[in-house]
Every structure is written in C-alpha cells, then in structure tokens.
Image: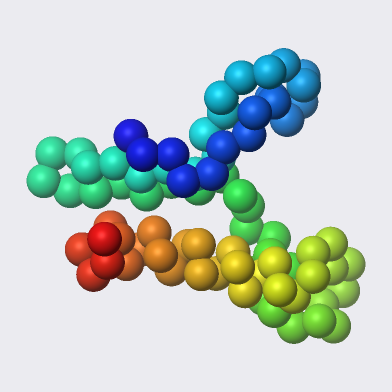
Amino acid sequence: MHDLLILDKHPETGEAGHFAVSWCKDYGTGKVFYTSLGHREDLIDGDPDIKDRKNAPEISKAYRAHVLGGIEWALGLKK
C-alpha cells in the first residue's frame, strides 16, 4: 500500500498515530485507489456561489485533481 495522504492524529480521539486518508496499491492484476475525503457538493463543484459552501473553490479544484489522478493511475494512464 502506498499512502497518498495521512493524518498523524485520529480525527475523533486525537490519538497520535498514522491514519491513511487516501492510498493506492496494486491488487492482483488490478489497481486500487481509495480516498475518504468526502463527496459534498461544495467539495466537488468549484462554483463559488454554492449554498452552504464550507471550502474555498480552490479546494474543490485540488480535490478533483486528487480524484482524477487516482482514476488515471488505476487505469494505467499515469504513474
């Protein structure tokens, strides 16, 4: 497993450790990409006028790039 993003503290308990938020690995003849970053509309859509936006539109752009990178890797399009 190759960690892409980690937390050094548990998000609920604050316990110190190594907690993978996003990772990838080869599995048999396939590939697995995982991210636990979420799926709220404001995280995916960069429109600054989305109601109840919690993140800046720039965060949406970075999140989409993260997910696209994982998909491209899993398809063998990028290393």
Does residue 69 sit above or below 8 in this rendering? below
Q: Residue at x 84, y 68 (%)?
A: 53
Regarding residue 75, the answer to whether it shows in the image is no
Q: Residue at x 32, y 67 (%)?
A: 72
Regarding residue 74, the answer to whether it shows in the image is yes
22 to the left or right of 76: right
| Image location (x, y in percent) of residue 17 | 61, 19
Does residue 75 sit above or below 22 in this rendering? below
Does residue 12 sit above or below 29 in this rendering? above
Q: Residue at x 85, y 83 (%)?
A: 49
Does residue 4 sit above or below 8 in this rendering? below
| Image location (x, y in percent) of residue 51 | 87, 74
45 to the left or right of 34: right
37 to the left or right of 11: left
30 to the left or right of 54: left
| Image location (x, y in percent) of residue 19 | 57, 28
Q: Closest to the observer: 39 or 9?
A: 9
Q: Residue at x 20, y 39 (%)?
A: 27
